[in-house]
Image (tube, coloured by chain):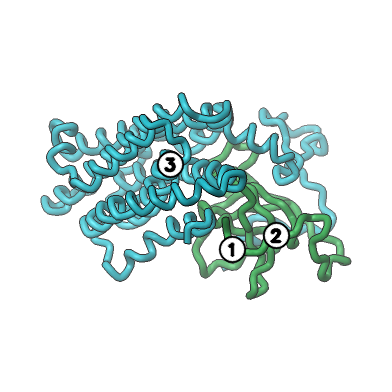
Chain colours: A cyan, B green
């Protein structure tokens, strides 16, 4: 496949009309300010831009504006058998625990974030996590669950509940690096890969909901890895402390991840693939 | 930190066959909807490991989105992934492929 060549036309020495609308005087004026080349932005301008509410708003608008509770308006429900429905309810209940943990933790982290950009980003993450919880609860109601909160409590696994408790302890202890590592690297990486895997085999409505969440998760995992990467550069001693956090929390997330993957029917032979993205992230941060 | 060697800055990057002028590309919006409209043409969805990237493209190793540039990429170039807020320097892998190496 060579879609790269199909989507960007090669023109030696070409001037991009897309970046110079004045070349086409009769064309309608674009609302957006043209960008000469995003990759030539100074690093400070790039960081300022992507951590802004303005950036967040115009990003989520692209994939959420035509949805209702994360479901595309044209997507039709397909019937599920009772065992399929029951397995899906269990998995969605587990997801709700993870999303609640991230909602509570990211809101608590705003107060201890070291700078304005991190505070503003976390404010957008709080909104994302609140939305995730809402769309998952709505999906549970779609599936006939009368009291989603009670159902979540009933189907919760010990490992997930323990992970949530430990994450919130790190936030309450004002341990910025450890809490960001636990939330934005460990939890978000696993959610990112599990939701992607689940979306491939899910019913159409659940797929819509999960794909929307995955798009938000890209920002969350990127923020966590970059924030920690910058801090580890200037305070390498932090690495040993984070390695201990990883040792403690990895097993909790892995246990719930295994259980979820079994519920959604991922073959044991395919499961190592799921952890690859997380392992690559910790390797880049120097925890291999 | 990564055990990989530190990437070289642009000014000292190897200029193998760089005497040739760079190819230029007109980027088109491919429907990547995760960044504001004005940035969309710089990114596209990745279709998996079997996909061959164009000379102006490199894969974001953090969030698996294809990063696109209006010019042919060469080792030492710096690019951004706006989908996951990551800065990269373009390097060449042992297999000769262009790669994006994270610059925190």
Task: Give the Cα distance between marks 1 and 3.
Answer: 22 Å
Residue at image location 57% in from the left, 59% down from the top: B2
Label 1 or label 2, whichever lies nearer to me, is: 1
Residue B53 versus residue A181 in the image, above or below: below
Task: Classify mark 2: helix, strand or loop.
Answer: loop
Chain identity of mark 3: A
> For mark 2, what is the residue?
B7
Disc sitting over residue B3 in the figure: 1
Q: Tell whether A127 sits left or right of A260.
A: right
Disc sitting over residue A257 in the figure: none
Q: Tell whether B28 sits left or right of A216.
A: right
Q: Tell whether B29 sits left or right of A9.
A: left
Residue B32 seen anywhere in this rendered image of the structure? no
Residue A26 versus residue A207 in the image, above or below: above
Residue at image location 74% in from the left, 55% down from the top: B77
Graded by Cα atoms within 10 Å as few (under 14), some (14 to 19) or many (20 or more), the crowding at tag 1 reads few
Question: Which image quarter is the N terminus of chain B in?
Answer: bottom right
Q: Within the image, what quadrant is residue A171 found in? A: top left
Chain identity of mark 2: B
Q: Within the image, what quadrant is residue A2 found in? A: bottom right
> For mark 3, what is the residue?
A178
């Amino acid at each position: 496949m060579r879609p790269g060549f199909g989507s960007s036309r090669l023109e030696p020495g070409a001037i991009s009309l897309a970046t110079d609308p004045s070349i086409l005087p009769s064309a309608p004026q674009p609302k957006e300010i043209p960008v000469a080349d995003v990759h030539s932005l100074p690093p400070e301008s790039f960081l300022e831009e992507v951590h802004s509410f303005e950036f967040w708003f115009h990003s989520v608008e692209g994939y959420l504006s035509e949805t209702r509770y994360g479901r595309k308006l044209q997507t039709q429900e397909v019937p599920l058998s009772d065992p399929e429905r029951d397995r899906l309810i269990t998995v969605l209940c587990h997801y709700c625990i993870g999303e609640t943990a991230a909602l509570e933790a990211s809101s608590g982290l705003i107060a201890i974030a070291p700078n304005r950009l991190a505070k503003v980003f976390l404010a957008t993450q709080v909104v994302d996590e609140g939305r995730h919880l809402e769309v998952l609860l709505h999906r549970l109601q779609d599936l006939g669950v009368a009291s989603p909160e009670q159902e979540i409590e009933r189907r919760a696994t010990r490992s997930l509940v323990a992970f949530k408790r430990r994450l919130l302890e790190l936030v309450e202890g004002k341990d910025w690096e450890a809490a960001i590592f636990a939330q934005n690297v460990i939890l978000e990486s696993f959610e990112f890969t599990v939701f992607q895997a689940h979306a491939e085999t899910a019913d159409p409505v659940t797929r819509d909901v999960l794909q929307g969440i995955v798009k938000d998760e890209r920002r969350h995992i990127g923020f966590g890895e970059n924030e920690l990467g910058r801090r580890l550069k200037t305070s390498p001693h932090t690495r040993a402390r984070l390695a201990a956090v990883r040792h403690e929390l990895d097993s909790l997330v892995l246990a719930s991840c295994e259980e979820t993957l079994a519920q959604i029917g991922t073959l044991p032979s395919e499961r190592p693939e799921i952890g690859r993205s997380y392992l690559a992230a910790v390797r880049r941060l120097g925890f291999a | 930190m990564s055990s990989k060697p530190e990437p070289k800055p642009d000014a000292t990057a190897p200029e193998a066959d760089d005497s040739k002028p760079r190819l230029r590309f007109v980027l088109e919006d491919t429907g990547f909807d995760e960044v504001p409209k004005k940035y969309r043409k710089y990114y596209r969805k990745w279709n998996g490991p079997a996909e061959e990237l164009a000379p102006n493209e490199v894969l974001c190793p953090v969030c698996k989105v294809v990063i696109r540039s209006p010019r042919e990429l060469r080792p030492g170039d710096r690019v951004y992934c706006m989908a996951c807020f990551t800065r990269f320097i373009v390097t060449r892998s042992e297999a000769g492929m262009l790669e994006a190496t994270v610059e925190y």
